[in-house]
Structures are given as structure tokens and as C-alpha cells.
Image (cartoon, rainbow, N blue to C red):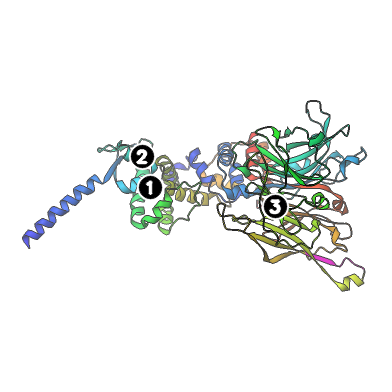
Amino acid sequence: MEVDKGKGEAEETRKVAEADRDTVTLKSSDGKLFEVSKEAAARLSTVLAGMIAGGSIDDNGTDLKQIGSEALENVVDYCNKHANSIPSAALISSSISFNTAPFKEPEEWERKFVDRLSHDALFDLVEAANFLGMERLLDVTCHKISEMMKGKSPDQIREVFNIKNDYTKEELEEIRQELAWAFYDD
Amino acid sequence: MRQEEGSNGTTNLPDDALAAVFARFSDAADVARCYATCRRWARVAAAALARAQPPEIARGCALLGLFHQEDPGVTAPRKRKRTPFSGTTVASGQPCFVPTAAAIARVFGLQIPTSMSDGGHGASLEYSRPIASRNGRVVLELCREGHGDGIRLCVFNPMTEETALLPPLSGKDKPGGYYACALLTGDDLLVKQPSFFRVLIVYNRRSFTALRAYSSDTNRWSSETARSPSRGPKIDSVRLRKLGQGVVLRGVAYWPLRRSALAVRLDGPEPAEVSMPKDGIPSDRPQHCRLLGVTPDTKQRLCFVDARFHSDRGLQRAGLPFLSFILVTTILNAGDGDDDYDIAAGRWVMRRGCIRFPEIMVSDFHSINLRWFCEKSGAIFFTVGEDSRSSGAYAVNVATGEVERVAHGPGCDNWRNVVGYEMDAGGYLAYISCY
């Protein structure tokens, strides 16, 4: 019994060591470190896949200067959740560019994942997904943002997105006339 | 928390991310309203649409209307009059534009310029006649001042006023008699260059039907190709004269024949006829009651639409307009997708359901003229003649059955050379953003 347990512990340690080598460490713009499974990173991000294949991954933390810690935390969170919830067959389609593949509606967990984010966190995540070449995450986040714009008048959109109207009154009137077909309800 | 912090500044959604969001809209009106929020969003909306148009937006039509002539052009006396539609003074015989309600107010005054520089050939657009239209451009046949030999075509973009003048077809190259014409643009042939186009004409020689195409990349007409007897006999000259609109689908132009369709592929500079099922198109209607079109769903299949009449004896006895009509669609079932579209092995299948027009009664079936099928918006233009209380021009959406009257009055029945005009939302936004 004693011997067996000891053997089991040794195996555990070896597994952890292996798992260590199976992750990559990412460093946010503000210097925080995040670990993500190498396999998930390579499958979900074309940029990270390229870096892993090209050997440009830094064991002490690969610098991602464009991405803040909050966004990077969400990216890593998404990678982990994705690895847990989607069968590998579905992952193949996520590597196809959105221009050629029809957009697949967000899954329930993806919807929840983006719903809990603040506007700024969501926008930062779009940027991060864009930067890292994560098509599926880009799809899901953009889908969420487009839903925030759909069916709204320009005024409502400006309010939601804090946009300053920089058109002159005349220009605005001209646009309204040009695009009269889009302004049926206000 | 950060949401509140951000609310005192402007949004930090960068251009790239905005473009990615806009590309995911399925309704062009949503993009248009984003366009109206601020200058930066307008720039991104226009650029995103110009770069990569998702098919849903490309199909969403921003501008829809028709060009026509009120008189048979050439012989019209030179007088100037006001048309009720354009709101501007035009010469009779000059093509007029009639927009649908969805068309933008700006184009109400849309005019074809009355003259253009063509290197001194004496061509005038004033008496030009529209003969084909596609993806925002119109093919005009120019009338020469001196009624000289040969035909001269030009491809005109009414929004940008760009014109491309084609080399004349004269002498032995001149098509004999009537000819049918189709326009194919870069979108049809997967050519990225925006100014690219090909023009196809079909006409009769003494013993055969001939095909000939112009390509803007070579800037010349192809040689004349005779229709192969294996594909079909010479087209009857009376039918050829009434062929009307050539519908374009996946780089092939189609015209309705009696039982089948004439199909000409134009992915190269030389036209090549494509085999079609020998029959299957309802053959017992006159040509003015039939049109080819494209189904408005994502499968985009070739379809055939014809008008069928029902008479009401009671109304006839009372001396009132007694004919009502319906539109029936027959679809060419030939595989499901782009790669799987074996037309020759396809079958024409009548679709269940039809579009009814309970408001429109006529006394003579000649009063109903199906004029044009707008492939992008899925609208059919038709005119109703003077024997009806509902005379005028109409647009009907084949997907929804929604009918819109775009012009009133019996005059519409006399319109000649009617071509539908549609421009996609992406192209339109790109256009006004340069404006």
C-alpha cells in the first residue's frame, strides 16, 4: 500500500512537470503573467500558433504589449472554457476565416461569457482577439457588439457607445436624406 | 466599473474592431445608421463594405428603380416636356429613371447626360436607349445623329457618371435586326477590378443565331460565334426580338425561349453556350407575360415567372375589366450549391403558391407586361395598361408578395426599353462617402 501510494505521487509530480511544458506563459502590457494550455492557444489563435511553431515563445512570459491584463485574463479564460466545452471536431471550423465560413451563433456559455463583460472590457477583448487572430472569439464578441447596435437610431447608438456627433447640422440633414430608407422609424 | 469610467470619453472601439462588427450586420439599414453617428464610423462603415461585403449586405438593395423611354425614342419629335416622375425637364425619348420608395430622394433627378465626349463620333445620349442593366450600371445603345451604319453601345454608371464607350459594330460586324443584350460585371465573374465588365449580344444571321461579347479588359469585341446546332436551332426572329432581359447567374446569362432557356457562359472573352434541359418551361404564354429570374433565397437558383389569368364572367357581362392575374414561379432544380450546379441535368419544378394581385383587373391580357426581374432585391417590375383602373408601373417582391406602385397612369404601358436598376447598399455607401 505504502509503496503504491509513493509510486502514485511520483507519477503525479511527473504529470505536473509535463503539464508545465504544455503551457505557454503570456505577459500583459502591465507585466502580469498568465498561463494557458499550449494546445488551446495554438488551436484558437493563429498568432500564438505561429509563435509556438516558430519557437518565439518566451518561457519567462511572452510579451503581448498591446493587451492589458484584464483583456488577457479574459482571453485565457475563454481559451480554458473553450477547451472544456467544445468537442474537438467543432474546433476545426473555428479556424476558418469568418469571411468564408458562415457565422455560427454563439453557444450558451459564450453568450454568458460576453454578457458579463462591461463595454470597455468587451471592446478590449475584441481588440485582443483581433490582435491574436482568434476568429471565433472575434465572432462572438463582435456579434455581441452588433446586437448592441441593431435596430437603434443613430442617437441611441451614440448614447450606448459614447460617440461625439461631429457632423454639422447641415451634413446630418443631408445624410438623413441620403439614407432615408434606413430611418423609417424615427 | 470601467464602463462608468469610459463614459466621459469617447468609445475606444478601434477601426479594425468596428470594421469586424459592421461586417457581421445582416441588414444594410443598421450599417447606414452607424454611418450616420459620426465621421470616423462613417469612414469605417464605407471602407469595410467596400473591402469585404458579406453576401447578406451585398444582396440588401439600397437603390431600386427602372429606366425607360416614354416613346420609341429615335423617331420621337424633338420636344421637351416635364415628366411626372423625374421632376425635371427632359427631352422625350431620353431615358427616364423611376425610383421605388426604397430608392433615395437624391436620384429623383437622376439624369443621363445629354451629350458626351466620344472622340467625335457624333454619338448622343439624348436618344440613347437602355438595353441592359446590372449591378449599378446600364448598357445604352447610342443613336447616331446621322443614323449611320452600325450600332454603338456604352456602359454607364448613373451614380458616378462614368461611361465606357464600346467600339462600334458596323459593316459586316453589324448585327442584323434585333439583338438581345446582357451585362456582366466583376461581381458575376469574380474579378476584383471595379470597372470590369463584359457585354454579350445575341442576334440572328441568315442561317444561324450568333453570339458576340465585348470585354473591358481586352477593350474589343470577340469574334462572332454561331450557336451550335447541337445546343439548339436558330432562334425564331420574332422570339429573338422579344427575348428581353438576360438574367445573369454565376457568370451565365439566360433568356427565356419557348420551352427552354438560352444560356451563355461568359467567364472568358469568348461566349460559350451552355446546355439546358430541353423543356420544362411553361410554353403557352406570350413572351410579355414571362421572365427568367433568380430565387431570392441563399440557394440562388434560376427560376421562371409567368403571369396566368383568370376571368370573371360576371364582370365581363357588365363590361368591366374582368381579368385578374397571378404570378407563378417555376424553379430549375439542379443541385444545391455553386460547385454542385449541373444545369443540363436539372428539372424545372413549379413552386407551390403564387402571388395574387386582387386589386388589379384588366380587360385584355396584353395589358400586363412583365418588364424586369431585379435579381438582387428579388423584385419584378411590371406595367398595367390603360384598360385598367389600376394602370401604372409596379414593383412586386417575389419573396414577400409585397406590391408597390412606382408610377401611375396609362402612359406606363407605352414605355419602351424598360430596364430595372439596382445598386447594392455597399456600393451606394462607398459612393456617397466619396461624395
Quote the CA–CA distance across marks 3 and 2. Answer: 53 Å
Quote the CA–CA distance across marks 2 and 1. Answer: 11 Å
From the image, state whether disc 3 or disc 2 is nearer to you. 3
Marks 3 and 2 belong to one chain: no
Q: Which residues are magenta?
A: B319-325
Residue B399 image offset from top left, x and y in percent: 67, 59
* Frontmost residue, B8 versus B143: B143
Is residue B322 highlighted in magenta? yes
Q: Which residue is mark 3?
A: B231
Label 3 packing within 10 angstroms: few (<14), some (14-19), many (20+): some
Quote the CA–CA distance across marks 3 and 1. Answer: 52 Å
Residue A37 seen in the current view: no
- Marks 3 and 2: CB-CB under 8 Å? no
Residue A44 seen in the current view: yes
Residue B415 sits above or below residue B146 on the image: below
From the image, state whether disc 2 or disc 1 is nearer to you. 2
Q: Quadrant of the N terminus of chain A?
A: bottom left
* Frontmost residue, A140 versus B226: B226
Q: Earlier in the sequence, mark 2 or mark 1?
A: 1
Q: Which residue is mark 2?
A: A50
Disc sitting over residue B411 in the figure: none
Q: Chain of mark 1?
A: A
Q: Which residue is mark 1?
A: A44
Q: Chain of mark 3?
A: B
Residue A114 image offset from top left, x and y in percent: 42, 52
Secondary structure of residue under mark 3: loop
